[in-house]
Image (spheres, helix red, strand yellow):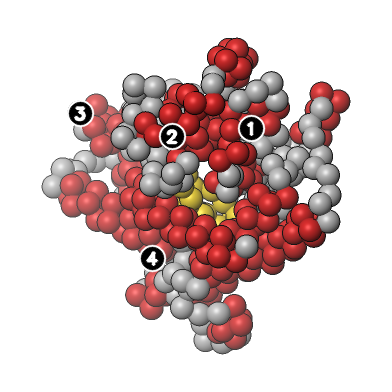
Amino acid sequence: MTVESAKNSVLGPLYSQDRILQAMGNIALAFHLLCERASPNSFWQPYIQTLPSEYDTPLYFEEEEVRCLQSTQAIHDVFSQYKNTARQYAYFYKVIQITTGYNLEDDRCECVALQDFQAGDQIYIFYGTRSNAEFVIHSGFFFDNNSHDRVKIKLGVSKSDRLYAMKAEVLARAGIPTSSVFALHFTEPPISAQLLAFLRVFCMTEEELKEHLLGDSAIDRIFTLGNAEFPVSWDNEVKLWTFLEDRASLLLKTYKTTIEEDKIVLKNPDLSVRATMAIKLRLGEKEILEKAVKSAAVNREYYRKHMEERAPLPRYEESDLGLLEGGVGDSRLPLVLRKLEEEAGVQESLSLTETVSKVKAAENGLVNGENSIPNGTRSENESLSPEESESVTGDTEESSGSMAKVKERL
């Protein structure tokens, strides 16, 4: 069953006129399925008979089972799903009056497997690199030991930061927005190249920012921002890992239960399948955050020791290009260098006075005579979903607050 087969059914006239059906293929397919199910002689009846009679996605949870999702990152998406489904139902309740039909040109649906199968073999599909929150919300199951599991973390550079303009410019050259949703991963290392680069810029001093904006080595410094082999400075590494440790610890405190309490609850034999899934989800999130806290603490002490010993910093050379291919999370979120060759000549002639003046201009909302997002940096919420963008502003202030704690600890 496809959107094309739905368009060729009795839904066709309505589909051609209704913008919601045109924009939301899942709704068109849902109505197509209902129509086919109502017809005992439908070509699709053998397929329809194999479908579950009930589902374990949160839309079908009882109230107490939904409560088990409290404090998880999935709960906001679940409520959005409830709200959107109710709106769609109310709209189509007044619109739909149809009969059933089926007419597909090739009279078949094709799926291509990545390997050969024998008749009677069970066939599996790859859902993609989904987190367990996405599995629970969209598929109704929890995948134990999911190597792609992750927890979202929203971070941003506050516009009230005295060094905002310089940080925004460095981030822009690395292709990273000043505010975004990153991820802490189930596997090691827990952070991606993009998150490492963001944290390094977030924790930079004014002098370190100038080094990434001016001079012959500025391009190389930008190029290695997301690579763990080339720290900005030992002090910067200590700050960023301290910040991440504090941030993950704060997120852990938002949960109403502890890891130990969740494990005890999961031993209850009377727990429903859905409640078990919800508790596993929040337990998994907490375990990822706890792992991130421990990893950050280890890294913090590792770089603090280097700082105390005044160990020399490794510097990037042309011969080190191979190291960049094996950096932290390079396969997840590679850095994008934005037109650095064209800008190199301009940056070499940029005076220190001009750079500092950009910082002052940003306080008035202008950089280079334009807005306070300099040289093509994306706006704070551009890359976020509607649900995520609502909370980024608050998270930006939290980020700055956490940074203040880092400074107190150093």
- Secondary structure at badge 3 equals helix
Report which quarter residue 333 is drawn in: top right
In the displayed structure image, the side of residue 379 where residue 295 appears, left or right: right
Q: Which residue is mark 1?
A: 211
* Marks 3 and 4, the one that precedes in the sequence: 3
Q: Which mark is residue 17?
A: 3
The correct choice, above or below, for 256 with respect to 288 in the image is: below
Identified at 60% across, 39% down, the residue is 207
Residue 104, horizontal then vertical, whole percent: 42, 27
State which mark lies toward you, 1 or 3: 1
In the displayed structure image, the side of residue 78 where residue 83 appears, left or right: left
Q: Which mark is residue 359?
A: 2
Name the kind of residue labelled 1 in the image.
Answer: Glu
Rounded to the nearest whole Å, what is the CA distance between mark 3 and mark 2?
53 Å
Rounded to the nearest whole Å, what is the CA distance between mark 1 and mark 2?
15 Å
Residue 23, horizontal then vertical, whole percent: 31, 33
* Marks 1 and 3, the one that precedes in the sequence: 3
Tags 3 and 4 touching, CB below 8 Å = no
Q: Which mark is residue 60?
A: 4
Name the kind of residue labelled 4 in the image.
Answer: Tyr
- Secondary structure at badge 1 equals helix
Identified at 82% across, 27% down, the residue is 317
The correct choice, above or below, for 6 with respect to 123 in the image is: above
State which mark lies toward you, 3 or 2: 2
Furthest residue toward right: 319
* Marks 3 and 2, the one that precedes in the sequence: 3
Identified at 49% across, 26% down, the residue is 353
Rounded to the nearest whole Å, what is the CA distance between mark 4 and mark 2?
52 Å
- Secondary structure at badge 4 equals helix
* Marks 4 and 2, the one that precedes in the sequence: 4
* Marks 1 and 4, the one that precedes in the sequence: 4
Name the kind of residue labelled 3 in the image.
Answer: Gln
